[in-house]
Image (tube, rainbow, N blue to C red):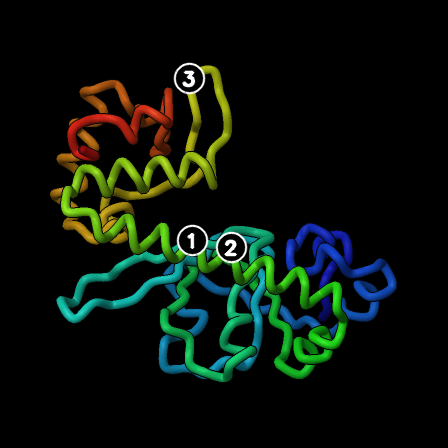
Amino acid sequence: MGADIEFLRQVSLFAALSDAELSALAPAFSERRYAAGEVVFSEEETGRCMYVVREGRVKVSRWLPSGRELILAHHDAPEHFGEMALLDGHTAPATVTAATRSVILLLSRIRFEELLHKPHFTRTLLDELCARCRAAWKQIELVSHRDAEARVRMALYRLSQSHGRETEQGTRIEMRLTHRELANMVGVTRETATRALMRLEGLKLIQVEERCFVVPEPDRLLEGPVFE
């Protein structure tokens, strides 16, 4: 089926490719559709493709020995994932699931390896991998904090930076997250996350509008005794 060249221009990994290179690459993509909750790939699968979110959202998660799900990241259009497994041939250390109805573009290992011969592509890839490493360190910092409320505050602050849109009321996090999903992002129970959110609402640090969080002043989330 191929991919739309105009869409591929929005994918950060392909930002350095010329129009001619994008035109040659576009037909190599295949497209798959996933229902909400459907697994895109699991931890046990080896890397066969890299993936680009065309529509919808996917979540990256791991199941802890306790049986609890820990959400590591979300990817929205036009973000990509799966390229690390293509580089080292190891299995992916997480399961990727469609959080909403999603359309995913797939690029085979062979075509990906052809791109590695283009210096401007590999430079962009290195930048992207460095960004992923920094994000992983932030995730470790988040789930390692001893205070549950601090974890929730840090998660909301990060989401306001990555998925925030400025409004008159403050920064609106453009993700419809349930209390359970937020809890799974920070490694606490749903009940604990709910108590923390109610406290943050009482302190006027967040508002809830149409199942989305609005943060009047994101920097204030990182203030207070839980961080001392």
The kind of residue tagged 1 is Ala
| Marks 1 and 2, how far apart at CA | 6 Å
Question: Does 109 appear above or below 204?
Answer: below
Residue 122, position as x, y percentages in the image: 68, 68
| Marks 3 and 1, how far apart at CA | 28 Å
Question: Does 151 appear above or below 126?
Answer: above
Q: Quadrant of the C terminus?
A: top left
Residue drawn at x 36%, y 76% as measured from the top left: 43
Identify the residue position indicated by label 3 in the image.
169
Give the label on residue 135, or none.
1
Q: Residues within 10 Å of mark 3 (few under 14, many from 20)?
A: few
The kind of residue tagged 3 is Gln
Residue 49, position as x, y percentages in the image: 57, 76
Contact check, label 3 and label 2, Cβ < 8 Å: no
Contact check, label 1 and label 2, Cβ < 8 Å: yes
The kind of residue tagged 2 is Ala
Identify the residue position indicated by label 2 in the image.
131
Q: Residues within 10 Å of mark 2 (few under 14, many from 20)?
A: few
Residue drawn at x 32%, y 57% as measured from the top left: 71
* SS class, disc 2: helix
Residue drawn at x 37%, y 55% as measured from the top left: 137
Q: Residues within 10 Å of mark 1 (few under 14, many from 20)?
A: some
Residue 120, position as x, y percentages in the image: 75, 63
Give the label on residue 216, or none.
none
Instruction: Please tell me which residue lies in front, 208 or 93.
Output: 93
- Apparent side of residue 181 relative to residue 51 in the rendered image (left or right): left
* SS class, disc 1: helix
